[in-house]
Amino acid sequence: MAACEKSLSQTFRKFFESKRSGGILLILGTVLALLLANSPVSASFLGIWQTYVAGLSIEHWVNDALMAAFFLLVGLELKHEMVNGELSNLKNAMLPLFAAFGGVAVPAAIHLALNTGTTTQPGIGIPMATDIVFALAALSLLGSKVPASLKVFLTALAVVDDLAAIVVIALFYTSQMSVTYLLCALATFAVLIALNRFFKVGALLPYLAGGLLMWFFMLQSGVHATLTGVLLAFAIPSSALQDDAHSPSHVLEHFLRKPVSLVILPIFALVNAGVIIGTGWADSLLTNNSLGVIAGLVIGKPLGITLMSFCAVALGLCRLPLDLSWRHVIGAGFLAGIGFTMSIFITNLAFTGAGDIINDSKMAILLASCLAGLVGVAWLTLFGHPTSMERNMDTMDLPIEDKS
């Protein structure tokens, strides 16, 4: 599929290629956290993260500060795709947009159906998320055995999915909001936009300095501080030229990619994946909240993504790329059920102070993410091979067409 490969921007290829090594380190961080949390040093290991430094616990520094860099990278990638990537063309963007909507709505509906009116109802956002790093790392294991368009589809789907999760965090997981600090944060954002649009400031330093100030205001406002990363991404200047290596947005995205994948996310896993597996662990997986998380990620994700994509195509709102079939969409749906990072992140916000519910939710997330990943890889291994027509496209040097 030479033609399809040519449609992948250099930025996208680098973004994708970093996922395998990042995924491995993420797994190692998760396994290490699980082992230490269930070892004789459990109390000491878990207690480290509650140590306060400069007014915040280490856990909060990781979840509120380091993860802001992760959201900044997500925002930069989303902006790139909207400006000159896969989402810049409305026709190309419609399929992952509809798929992401289904992948958010159906898991949320499943969890809500099981937990409505209970103390665990706030967990509705947990199965809505997709872990970009793990999902693309799993897909990378298949290499050329799957169509190139599937990589594009899953990446766009996961980015839009995370954007939806960010909106959910902003709207539903904000407590004791300070209007004054929020207005200060928004005013700082407006100044950064003005530096970009009206004063044409091309240096990164003013935007990074303003981003730090906006992060502080956002932290004090009660709105989760990591949202600063997304706002900052859209304030930083970018170029409409494909892969302009000198634009501030491209430079920062290139700089952040490796530290986020290889350092920040493994640290996040080490701090947050320390699930204590007690004697009643099996019973905890049968609670309505855990069942909602597991069913939402393992069943709701592929069901919602596939059904919404099918309806959109059947109604003529969008089309499948020529080298994709519905079996590929189903496989991508399972891989999108790997919630891990974002699901754990939302868990911490949904059940603040409820240690047992957080622990049980994380256990359900780990189990569901493993199941979704294994099923997705197995499905695509068995059914994801390109057809003879799709393989013939490898020899073609024509622009990608769509299925009618």
Image (cartoon, rainbow, N blue to C red):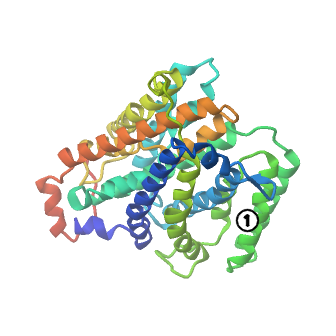
- Residue ID at (14%, 52%): 387
Image position, residue 359 (x, y; %): 57, 35
| Residue type at the position of mark 1 | Gly
Question: 354 or 350, which lies in front?
Answer: 354
Tell me: residue 127, above or below residue 290. Answer: below
Count of residue discs: 1
Name the residue at the front extreme.
40
- Residue ID at (61%, 30%): 356
Residue 264 in sight here: yes
- Residue ID at (60%, 57%): 71
333 sits left or right of 39 in the view: left
Tell me: residue 401, above or below residue 291. Answer: below
Image position, residue 212 (x, y; %): 75, 65
Name the residue at the top extreme.
117
Image position, residue 147 (x, y; %): 25, 57
Instruction: Characterize the local packing of mark 1: few (<14), some (14-19) or many (20 or more) Cα atoms within 10 angstroms.
Output: many
- Residue pointed to by mark 1: 211
Name the residue at the left extreme.
388
The N terminus lies in quadrant? bottom left
Image position, residue 267 (x, y; %): 56, 57
- Residue ID at (44%, 62%): 22
41 sits left or right of 381 in the view: right
Name the residue at the right extreme.
180
281 sits left or right of 53 in the view: left
* Secondary element at image label 1: helix
Tell me: residue 219, above or below residue 42. Answer: below
Residue 200 in sight here: no
